[in-house]
Amino acid sequence: QRQSELVLFGLSDRLFRLFEITGLSDIIEIKNVEGEMNGNNA
């Protein structure tokens, strides 16, 4: 069994609940990271 990991920034509770309902949270470890991702805004 292979475990995947998904890291999301600013995941809302409603969206996380959707992952639970669809069963994706059972096969993918979903992490919600508070804050914003650093990047270039050109």
Image (cartoon, rainbow, N blue to C red):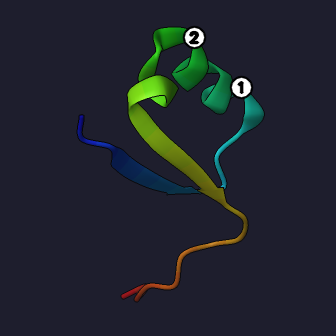
Q: Is residue 7 above or below residue 25?
A: below
Q: Contact, CB < 8 Å: mark 2 with mark 1?
A: no
- Residue 2 vs 7, above or below: the answer is above
Taking 40 as reference, is 2 left or right?
left
Rendered image: mark on residue 6: none
Disc 2 element: helix
- How many marks can you see? 2
Residue 37 against residue 10 in the figure, above or below: below
Task: Give the mark, 2 or 1, whose residue is nearer the N terminus.
Answer: 1
* Quarter of the image that includes the C terminus: bottom left
Q: Position of residue 11 (x, y in %)?
A: 64, 46
Q: Which residue is disc 1 drawn over?
A: 14
Q: Where's residue 2, x and y in %?
A: 24, 41
Q: Amino acid at mark 2?
A: Ile
Residue at position x 40%, y 89% from top? 40
Would residue 19 appear left or right of 13 to someone viewing this image?
A: left
Residue on which the image places disc 2: 21
Residue 34 found in image quarter = bottom right
